[in-house]
Amino acid sequence: MTVVAVSEDPEQRWDDLVRFWEEMEWPEGSKVEIIEGIVTVSPAPGLHHHAIAASMQRPLYSVIPRNWSIFQTQAIAVPSRLGMLVPDLLVYPDRENPESDTHLPATPAELVVEVTSAYNARHDRITKPAAYATAGIPLYLLVDRWAPDGPTVTLFGEPNGDVYQPLDSVKFGEPIKLPAPFDLVIDTGEFPET
């Protein structure tokens, strides 16, 4: 077991958490995030998880500017929420000379996508959207494979404080439209359900 001593000063505490996150040797292939000040280690996502992300990534490339990127494993920092989050998809305007080679600031992101897994659904439904909204990320797409009423895709936008407004929600198999700057219809019929 590893114990980390962190300062009570919020800025120093954030710096200590980031340093620990960056310097610790984590299990290969794991997803390591800081969620509300707690370092969280999750197993690598499974094949269906990756298939959903890939089926969204391909059409997104056709509508984004050439100087934007789409990442599947890029960490973004939300220091005010003590968060270092790794969305399943991140659409991000390219930045020259980033401050860090391990993470990017969350604020410039245009879209984040989370695909739930059985063990992380609560974070993807509650904790992470609060951090993404706080950062002012315009759009959050939640692909909830484990929703109580069956697999759904929900688009959130209009961040205000730490809350998003739901803009649209569909069951797997129905299309969902991403608004400007994307103006793209995602065919959720391609998503594997399990």
Image: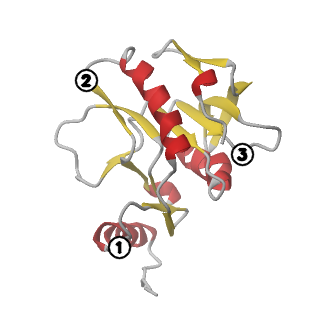
Outermost residue, left side: 97
- Reading the image, the residue beneath label 2 is 67
Compared to 159, does 87 lie above or below? below
Asked if disc 2 and disc 1 are in contact, CB closer than 8 Å, the reply is: no
Q: Position of residue 156 (x, y in %)?
A: 63, 31
Question: At 52% across and 30% down in the image, what residue appears?
Answer: 138
> Quick one: SS at disc 1?
helix
Disc 1 marks a residue whose amino acid type is: Phe
Disc 2 marks a residue whose amino acid type is: Asn
> Quick one: SS at disc 2?
loop
Marks 3 and 2 sit apart, C-alpha to C-alpha, by: 34 Å
Question: At 32% across and 74% down in the image, what residue appears?
Answer: 24
Question: At 50% across and 62% down in the image, what residue appears?
Answer: 43
Disc 3 marks a residue whose amino acid type is: Trp
Q: Position of residue 115 (x, y in %)?
A: 57, 42
> Quick one: SS at disc 3?
loop
| Residue nearest the viewer, comparing 164 with 147 | 147
- Reading the image, the residue beneath label 3 is 146
What quarter of the picture does the C terminus occupy? top right
Crowding at mark 2 (Cα within 10 Å: few <14, some 14-19, many 20+): few
